[in-house]
Image (cartoon, helix red, strand yellow):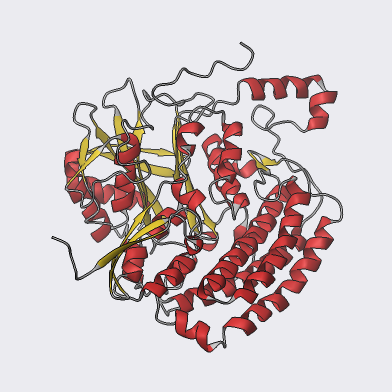
Amino acid sequence: MANFETMTINMGPQHPSTHGVLQLVLELDGEIVRKATPHIGFLHRGVEKLAEHRTYHQVLPLTDRLDYLAPMHNNLGYVLAVEKLLGITDAIPERAQVVRVLLAELTRLKSHLVWLACHALDIGAMTVFIYCFREREHIMNIYEKVSGARMTSNYFRVGGLSADLPAGLEQEIREFVNTMPGHIETYEGLLTGNKIWQKRIKDVGVISAEDAIDLGVTGPSLRGSGVDWDLRRDQPYSGYENYDFEVVVEDGCDTWARYHVRLKEMREACKIIHQALDKLKPGPILADAPKIVLPPKQATVNTIEGLIHHFKLISEGFKPEVGEVYVGVENPKGEVGFYLVSDGSPRPHRMKIRPASFINLQALPKMCEGSMIADVVAVIGTLDIVLGEIDR
Amino acid sequence: MSVQAAVDKLKARFGETVLATSEFRGETTVVVKKEEIVVVCAFLKGELGFNFLTDLCGVDYMGQAPRFMVVYQLYNIGTHTRLRIKAPVEEGDARIDTVSGVWATANWLERECWDLMGITFNNHPDPRRILLPADWEGHPLRKDYPVQGPDREPYQGRLQ
């Protein structure tokens, strides 16, 4: 018998505010959402399976394509996991560490800019979108100068970096970051005091700290519920313990609180970038471990040792000892982790990615059931999901 | 509480259920019997403060017995420590009890583990595939599932 009480509709997979190919089956009672069921997997590429058939160096480009809004963070998580597996974490040179932090924080800015742009656009504030993408374009240009690509950076390497920063880039980054606080004020000027914006996000998508922890929510979405936890401070990697920054926590538990967390995080990221630029001193960018680290191009073509190492590493790869490690990093969206199992061969026996967006998305039904259908759009925006990472 | 203290308490409480412990690169792994997994996890969460399930996955050790390991990565938000729990699962009886009653996170992670690795989770509230279509046959992350797909010849290289 047909059910006249509720109506079931599809939101997505082709819907502009689902940020990709997410399908939500919504059971509606008038405008009230009674049940929301996410359907995912439309973008599944089998990254974990592919990784088992590649050498450790060859897996790195696959990680760019997970969270394509923050590719450097995925690179970072992966290389840190491999370095831990090899036991060379302490051998990474200072300059490589600082550049990693510098670019990771630029990536955080970039990712948060897309979040703010799309979140505001979904709710109807189009101007912010244009401004945010203007600044993001600047970061994209920096990305291109650093790695040669705008999105799929593939820049970090096991043992260091693929290349040094181009000359003059430090000055360009500093000038850009100097302008950023002013830009953030512009966004806030457009949104924070705006009555429509406030009504659309205050007390929307509420999730308590207990529920958020139970559902595994991480990152700004968790800190918006008052949980003071940031891996950069609590399990520091890449020398984050040497930087002075504040972990932003808000107690509101709603979309408004998460909005403030991310905006303040952008300001903190600017602070960290400045500190990283101050710390940046000339020096080596690759660890001294020729059996593991890909030699620089000059060494490959000019020295016989470089050529041999290059040939061995490309044709065979390195063989970590048998063991397993898990490394989690604070991605702009939450904790992204890599669990690597080595069986002593040059390929990972198993690579499990802990996708922040996948696990955060699980909280969506909890956050929007019982609220209006228009709030679903705000909740998707505030969770800051990216489907490349959810589906892998 | 340090990780070592937690492991000691776990051993004291469960005795022979704890099959092995090991340490590698500063990470502690505890292997427990799969029959007791829910009780062990509830104890870890309730008594030892591992209130956050970071990740859950299956690993296929084809050719060994038992063939599968279900791996739980735990985190203690109070002390910021990690612990890894593993439970061996036989190929002939590839099933284990769900821990979604302990941590709600496990719901989707166990669905993914069933979908890609083919390990059934007893009493799971929503045992559907999650990443692959509902009518998909096989479990791609198993080692005997070919990387190019089930009915295709393996890629021989372009210089044939």
Q: Residue A218 at x, y = what percent? A: 44, 61
Q: Along the horizontal axis of the image, is A14 left or right of B115? A: right
What residue is rendered at 67% in x and 52% in y?
Answer: A100
Q: Along the horizontal axis of the image, is B110 left or right of A333? A: left
Q: Nearer the viewer, residue A44 or A5?
A: A5
State the residue lying farthest toward the left.
Answer: A1
Q: Residue A144 at x, y = what percent? A: 75, 50
- Number of labels in the image equals 0
What residue is rendered at 85% in x and 24% in y?
Answer: A302
The quadrant in which the N terminus of chain A is found is: bottom left
Q: Residue A97 at x, y = what percent? A: 67, 50
What residue is rendered at 32% in x and 39% in y?
Answer: B115
What residue is rendered at 46% in x and 37% in y?
Answer: A46
Q: Is residue B47 visible?
A: no
Q: Quadrant of residue B52?
A: bottom left
Q: Nearer the viewer, residue A100 or A206?
A: A206
Q: Quadrant of residue A70?
A: bottom right
Q: Quadrant of residue A13?
A: bottom left
Q: Residue A270 at x, y = what percent? A: 68, 68
When the figure is inspected, residue B48 is found, relative to residue B40, above or below; the finding is below
Q: Nearer the viewer, residue A334 or A199?
A: A199
Q: Nearer the viewer, residue B87 or B25?
A: B87
Q: Along the horizontal axis of the image, is A191 left or right of A136? A: left
Q: Is residue A378 visible?
A: yes
When the figure is inspected, residue B158 is found, relative to residue A354, above or below; the finding is above
